[in-house]
Amino acid sequence: MSASNNANRRLITEITKLKALSTSNDSSSVKFILDKSPIDDPSGGSRAGANNSAQNIILGRILPTSNIYNQAAYQIEIKLPAEFPFKPPEIRFITSIYHPNVDEQGKICVDLLNSNETWKPTTPLVDVVKAVVELIDNPKIDHALNAEIASEYTTNKAEFDRKALALVKKNGLPRS
């Protein structure tokens, strides 16, 4: 079987698992609503296997559970490089979020994706989504991408909460 067919099969499996997160009845499970994938809409992104240099893009909404962030959904982009699963995906927030671990361009630093020691080709995209939600629900101040927001989070939580809530109300997406 060709590498392209294996890549297509892997992508289909990963997207199927991501779709299942939206209907899971397990209250401890992370919720993710798939908005767009290369399989559902090949014209909107690169089709799996269509071009080895192309990147496949998945758009979906995460539903954090922590106070303030649990009031909305946040769209993220999962960009799969041509070398996926041997190289990790890149994650970016499309929905603006006031958070110490998300920069102004929407980039997020997730440990799972940043090291050859933690990223494995067998890592499922469901685990990537879980890691993103975990970081949103439990910020890592020591690894903040926005030092000013991190400082505010630790020294003036009430002001941080006020600003975060204002952005949730302004930009948050529906949770269904």
Image (tube, rainbow, N blue to C red):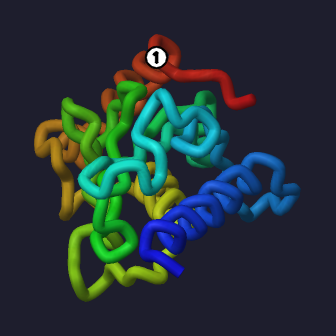
Residue at point 41%, 19% (across, down): 167
Is 154 on the left or on the right of 171, as rendered?
Answer: left
Residue at point 46%, 17% (across, down): 171
Q: What residue type is labelled 1?
A: Asn
Question: Looking at the picture, does residue 119 appear above or below residue 156?
Answer: below
Question: Looking at the picture, does residue 3 appear above or below residue 92?
Answer: below
User: Which residue lies most toward the left here?
Assistant: 147
Secondary structure beneath label 1: helix
Q: Position of residue 89 (x, y in %)?
A: 34, 59
Foreground residue, 168 or 29?
Answer: 29
Q: Position of residue 102 (x, y in %)?
A: 27, 43
Residue at point 41%, 57% (across, down): 135
Q: Position of residue 81 (x, y in %)?
A: 30, 57
Crowd around label 1: few <14 · some 14–19 · many ≥20 (10 Å): some
* Residue pointed to by mark 1: 171
Question: Looking at the picture, does residue 70 appear above or below residue 163?
Answer: below
Q: Where is residue 23 in the image (x, y as percent from the top left)?
A: 82, 49
